Amino acid sequence: MVFQEDESGFFYIYLDDARRNIVVEHYEGVEREVRGHRRTATGKINKVFKGSNAETIYRTILGNGLISRIDHAAYVGYELAKAEIALKNGLKYEQDRPVKV
């Protein structure tokens, strides 16, 4: 599958270990051409979601209409599930990286 950006923006997912929360920042994407290739540069932050339950956060994101591509929805759900597993088990979570047990 060829990567295509979601016109609705992109997400940065991380853990706030001190508060025992998953934090999801939604950014409005900014596309730029860099050396002949389209790239997403840092966008403007749009919304922040926090919680300890991946499904609740996921449903809130979908309810806010922040995902327009089904593959992006699947990716965000996958990353949120990994984040919740890491949070509940005291593991390190880094987006786009495997959770190490």
Image (cartoon, helix red, strand yellow):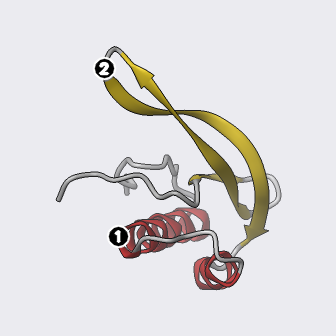
The image's mark for residue 36 is 2
Q: Determine which quarter of the picture holds residue 53.
A: bottom right
Quick one: 75 or 93, which is closer to the camera? 75
x, y percentage for residue 71? 35, 70
x, y percentage for residue 61? 65, 75
Q: Which kind of residue does numbered mark 1 sit on?
A: Asp
Closer mark to the observer between disc 2 and disc 1? 2
x, y percentage for residue 17? 72, 53
**Vertical relation: 91 (above or below) 36:** below
**Vertical relation: 52 (above or below) 93:** below
**Vertical relation: 70 (above or below) 45:** below
**Vertical relation: 47 (above or below) 41:** below
**Left or right, 1 with reference to 66:** left
Secondary structure type for disc 2 = loop
Q: Can you see residue 5?
A: yes
Label 2 to label 1, Cα distance in Å? 25 Å
Residue at point 70% right, 74% down?
52
- In the picture, the quarter occupied by the N terminus is bottom left
Residue at point 50% right, 71% down?
68
Q: Can you see residue 15?
A: no
Secondary structure type for disc 1 = helix
The image's mark for residue 92 is none
Q: Name the residue under label 1.
A: 71
Residue at point 59% right, 77% down?
54
**Left or right, 23 with reference to 71:** right
Residue at point 45% right, 73% down?
73
Q: Earlier in the sequence, mark 2 or mark 1?
A: 2
